[in-house]
Amino acid sequence: MAASVMKEGKKTESVVIVKLAECDCCGLTEECTQAYIASVREKFEGRWLCGLCSEAVNDETVRSEEDITTNEAMDRHMKFCEQFKSSSPPANPAEDLISAMRHLFRRCLESPRKNKSSPSTSFSRSKNCFSTLSNEEVRT
């Protein structure tokens, strides 16, 4: 990636070298500058983590009841990523989708209906939004 910079009336070219970095947790690759890669590696004890995994590790550190190190939080998150990657996809995705939709419809049908005489929200519409158009306006 190259960037042009105007300095004292002269145009100078600045070249920023971008490298691909692979996340040590999830395997995602991102384009990053060498300086950014170095700062992330410094923060996470030599490992490079993508933005999502770094947030998950930080969250793991904060949520833990006991005081854990960044390395322990990374190990927990890496174990979670490995378990997620090792789970097998469904044998037939179409049947899985149909089953999920069937379950959703059953839940909707079995849920108790609300009383229609009293609106549950303050936003209720009494008419169609196109009711003000006359037949002549629709034809033209």
Image (spheres, rainbow, N blue to C red):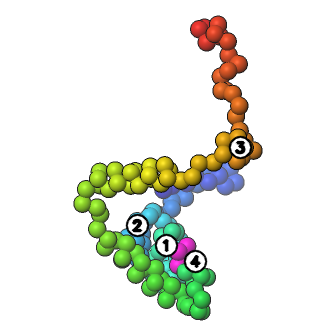
State which region is magenta. Answer: 54-58
Residue that numbered label 1 is attached to: 53
| Spatial separation of the CA atoms under disc 2 and disc 3 | 47 Å
For the C terminus, which image quadrant? top right
In the rendered structure, which disc, 2 or 3, sits on the residue that comes first in sequence? 2
Q: Are marks 2 and 4 in contact (CB under 8 Å)?
A: no
Q: Are marks 2 and 1 in contact (CB under 8 Å)?
A: yes
**From what the image shows, is residue 124 above or below residue 3?**
above
Identity of the residue drawn at 71% across and 43% down: 119
Look at label 4 and name its amino acid: Asp
Magenta-drawn stretch contains 40:
no
49 vs 119, left or right, is left
67 vs 48, left or right, is right
In the rendered structure, which disc, 2 or 1, sits on the residue that comes first in sequence? 2
Look at label 3 and name its amino acid: Pro
Crowd around label 2: few <14 · some 14–19 · many ≥20 (10 Å): some
Task: Work out whether residue 107 or residue 55 is closer to the camera in this orientation and state it.
Answer: 107
| Spatial separation of the CA atoms under disc 2 and disc 1 | 10 Å
Residue that numbered label 2 is attached to: 28
Q: Are marks 4 and 3 in contact (CB under 8 Å)?
A: no
* Residue 135 coordinates in the image, percent (x, y): 63, 10
Give residue 119's mark: 3
Q: Tag 4's secondary structure?
A: helix
Name of the residue lying farthest toward the left: 91
| Spatial separation of the CA atoms under disc 2 and disc 4 | 19 Å
Q: Tag 3's secondary structure?
A: loop
Residue that numbered label 4 is attached to: 59
| Spatial separation of the CA atoms under disc 1 and disc 3 | 43 Å
Q: Tag 1's secondary structure?
A: helix
| Spatial separation of the CA atoms under disc 1 and disc 4 | 10 Å
